Image (cartoon, rainbow, N blue to C red):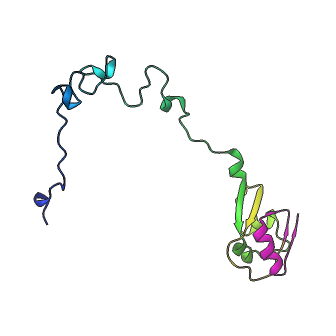
Amino acid sequence: MYLNDLHPTRRVKAKRVGRGIGSGLGKTCGRGHKGQKSRAGGFHKLGFEGGQMPLQRRLPKVGFRARKSRKTDEIRTSELNGVSRDPIDLAALREAGLVNRIVQQVKVVLSGELSKPVHLKGLAVTKGARAAIEVAGGSVED
């Protein structure tokens, strides 16, 4: 197959405007009556809203990033296997290199297996993670 062998499966017929009432595109040729869009050369740039401040200029230039999101983090239950200190708190997670020094709140989520009993202190825990920790013989202290 070559590029010069390619051809469209269906050829779309061009719109024949200005060919009488019966064609459905006579007189105003589908442009309606008056207004900028009906005129020859009646073009306005993309996003133009008739003089109203356009959406792309109303919105802020930079995206939103919550300040709180930088101070919170999530830890998987499988990552707790690598922490040697007991009980596991925020300081222990920092020592293990699992969370950044900026982080102030950590939530433990269920993901992976726990191979040893762990004791958590001062960390937020999801229901599933709490159940997995208790099944492994660990405990959660709020």
Q: Residue 109: percent from the left, percent from the top?
A: 72, 67
The N terminus - image quarter = bottom left
Which one is nearer the viewer's eye here, 15 or 134? 15
Residue depicted at x 81% and y 80%: 135
Q: Can residue 102 be seen in the rendering of this structure?
A: no
Q: Is residue 52 left or right of residue 21?
A: right
Q: Is residue 119 left or right of residue 95?
A: right
Q: Can residue 57 be seen in the rendering of this structure?
A: yes
> Dividing the picture into quarters, in which one does residue 112 lie?
bottom right
The C terminus - image quarter = bottom right
Which one is nearer the viewer's eye here, 60 or 11? 11
Q: Residue 99: percent from the left, percent from the top?
A: 71, 62
> Dividing the picture into quarters, in which one does residue 94 lie?
bottom right
Give the answer, above or below, for where 107 lies relative to 59.
below
Q: Is residue 138 left or right of residue 34?
A: right
Magenta region: 120-142
